Image: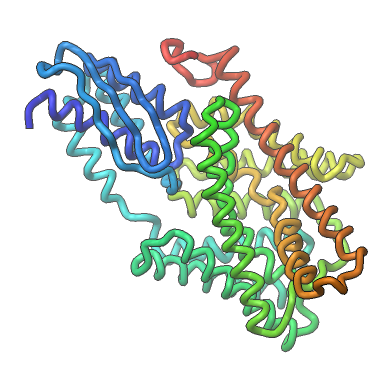
Amino acid sequence: MTAAGDTVAVVAAVARLLYSNGLTTERLIETVERLGRACGLTVSVLPAWGEIVLRMEGDSLPGGPVVETVAAAPTGVEMNKVTRTLDIVEAVAAGRMNAGQALAALRAIDRLAPVSLLRAVAMNGAGAVALAIIFGASDPATLLLTGFSACAGGALRRGLAHIAANMLTQPLCAALLAGFVAALTSRLLPDADPYLIALCPCMILVPGPHLLNGALDLARLRIALGVARFSFAGLIILVICTGLIAGLALGRESLPPPGPVVAVPLLFDVLAAGVAVAAYGTFFSMPWRTLGIPIVIGMLAHASRWLALADGTSVAGGAFIACLLVGVIVTPVANRLHLPFAAVAFASVVSLLPGAFLFRLAAGLVTLMNAGETAAPAILVPLVVDATTAAAILLAMAFGLILPKMMLERLFPVWSGVAPATRR
C-alpha cells in the first residue's frame, strides 16, 4: 500500500473505531478532522446509521479527492478501544508515529478482546446487588437471588455473543431469565422481594449511552442520527420488557407490585452507587487504571441526589441535580483522559434511570390488554403516572448531562479539554 493509501486507511480506521465504540458524534468529527490536518488532508465527516462517509482532499493525494464509505454502526461501547485510538491520534498529530505504524496499531486495537468472563459475570452480579441496595433491599435472600440472577444473565449474554450476531438476542434472553427467576422466587420464597429480583438484573441491561448519545445528536440538530440512536435504544428497552414479562409468564406470574419505600442511609446509598458504577465501567471495558474516576463522580452524584430528596425535592428534580453535577465534572475529565463522555456520564448515574417505571408501564399495558373492554378505568391511572414520571426523569437526566457539556465546551474550550482549533 502506498503512503497516501496508508493515510486514507488510518483516517478510515480511526473513524470506524471511534464511531462504533461510543464516542459522541461531535467529538468524532473533531478528532477525525484534526487527524486529517495532521496528515495534510482536509476531511469532511458525514456520519449516518450504518456508515460514515469521509471526503478527503489534499496535496498528498495524487489522484485528487477521495471519498471513502466506511461501514460502521454506533452500537458498541468499548472505552479501552476509544482511549487507545485517541492516543494514536495524538501520537500521529505530534509526529511520533507515521501512517504505517498507526495502521498496524489500529488493527491491534480492533482485535482487543472484551473484559474477562469472570470479571464480567462477577461485576454483573455486584452491580445488580448494588442497585437492589439503592432501591431499599436489605434481606440476604433478595440480595443473593438478585446477584445469582444477574450473574447467570451475564454469563448467558457472553455465551450468546459468540453464537448470535443479532444484538437484541442477548438482552432478551437475560431479561427472560431474570423474569423466570423472579417468578420462581415469588412461589418458593415469599419472604424475598420478587419485584427487586426482577427489576435489578434488567436495569443492568438498559442502553444508557445510546440514549445519551442520541440526545446529544438531537441537541446538535443531527435529527436523523439522533432518531436512529433513540430507535436502537428503544428497541433494546422493548425487548428487555418483553423478556421480563415473558419470563414471569413462564412461571405463571406477573410483575409484582413494589414494596413500601425504604429510606436508605446516605453511606449505604453512596457506597452502593460506587459498586454500580464499577460494574458499568466493566461492561464498557474501562481499564482498571481509570475506573476510580467515574466511581468517585458517581458517589458524589448520589450523595447530591440523596440530600436533594431528603430536602423534599421531587424524583425528577433530584435526578437533574445529580446529572448536572456529573455533566460539569465529566466534561473536562472525559475530554482530557480520552474517554467517551456518554459511557462515563451514564455509568455515574445509572441507578437514576426510571427502569422501574418503564417495566411497570410495560406490565400494566399487558394487564390492560388482557382485561380488554372490561378493564376498569382505574387501571389507566398508574399507567399514566408511570409514563409521566419516566418521561420527566429521562428529560431531567438528559438536560442535566447535556447542558453543562455543551456550555462548557463552547464557553471554556481549553478548560474543558477541547483544543481551541476544534471549537465550533
Q: Quadrant of residue 253?
A: bottom right
Q: Quadrant of residue 42?
A: top left
| 20 and 66: which is toward the camera | 66
Q: Taking 188 as reference, is 87 above or below it? A: above
| Left or right, 21 with reference to 277 | left
| 63 and 308: which is toward the camera | 63
* x and y percentages locating residue 189 in the rendered image: 74, 85
Q: Taking 155 as reference, is 424 above or below it? A: above
| Left or right, 302 with reference to 310 | left
Numbered circles on residues, count: 0
Q: Residue furthest front?
A: 373
Residue at the image point whose x is 43% and y is 32% from the top: 338
Residue at the image point whose x is 34% and y is 69% from the top: 163
* x and y percentages locating residue 130 in the rendered image: 66, 59
Here the colouring is: rainbow
| Left or right, 182 with reference to 49 | right
Q: Taking 121 as reference, is 295 above or below it? A: above
| 250 and 384: which is toward the camera | 384
* Residue 367 visible, this angle: yes
Residue at the image point whose x is 79% and y is 62% from the top: 136
| 19 and 204: which is toward the camera | 19
Quadrant location, the N terminus: top left
Q: Quadrant of residue 35?
A: top left
* x and y percentages locating residue 406 in the rendered image: 59, 22
* Residue 139 visible, this angle: no
Residue at the image point whose x is 60% and y is 12% from the top: 411
* x and y percentages locating residue 288 in the rendered image: 45, 47
Q: Residue furthest bottom?
A: 188
